[in-house]
Image: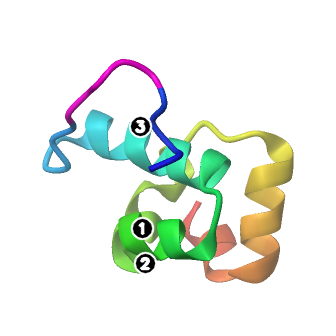
Amino acid sequence: MTIDWGPGCSYDLGEDADRRVVYERVLREAASTVEVCRYVNGRVLLDVWGRLWLPRRVRGNWEECFPELVRAA
């Protein structure tokens, strides 16, 4: 995995804070579409979108491809 290159961590995706950290890292750092598909659930992404801290370019690219994210924010 190329996304979480720091010290070994585990995440509880049932916890909102952990879920947001994982989604932020995947959306910023995934090296392939395969990684995005492996870790991102569309419904969860819609739920957390407005609370993610993302670079403007990353947010803009995702919103351009998926306009429903704009409405979810």
Gap in angstroms between the C-alphas marked 2 and 3: 16 Å
Instruction: Give residue 28's position: percent from left, percent from top.
Output: 65, 47
Q: Is residue 11 left or right of residue 34?
A: left
Instruction: Give residue 22's position: percent from left, percent from top.
Output: 40, 44
Gap in angstroms between the C-alphas marked 2 and 1: 6 Å
Secondary element at tag 1: loop
Amino acid at circle 2: Gly
Secondary element at tag 2: helix
Q: Which mark is residue 40?
A: 1
Q: Is residue 70 left or right of residue 40?
A: right
Disc 1: CA contacts within 10 A as few (<14), some (14-19) or many (>=20): some
Looking at the image, which residue is at 60% across and 75% down?
Answer: 33
Disc 2: CA contacts within 10 A as few (<14), some (14-19) or many (>=20): few
Q: Is residue 41 left or right of residue 30?
A: left
Residue 60 on the magenta span: no
The region drawn magenta spans: 6-10
Prevailing SS of the magenta stretch: loop
Amino acid at circle 1: Val
Looking at the image, which residue is at 82% across and 75% down?
Answer: 64
Label 3 near label 2: C-beta < 8 Å?
A: no
Question: Residue tagged by mark 3?
Answer: 21
Gap in angstroms between the C-alphas marked 1 and 3: 12 Å
Looking at the image, which residue is at 67% across and 41% down?
Answer: 54
Q: Is residue 15 above or below residue 69?
A: above
Amino acid at circle 3: Val
Pick whichever, 34 or 69, lies toward us: 34
Secondary element at tag 3: helix
- Quarter of the rendering containing residue 71: bottom right
Q: Is residue 70 above or below residue 53?
A: below
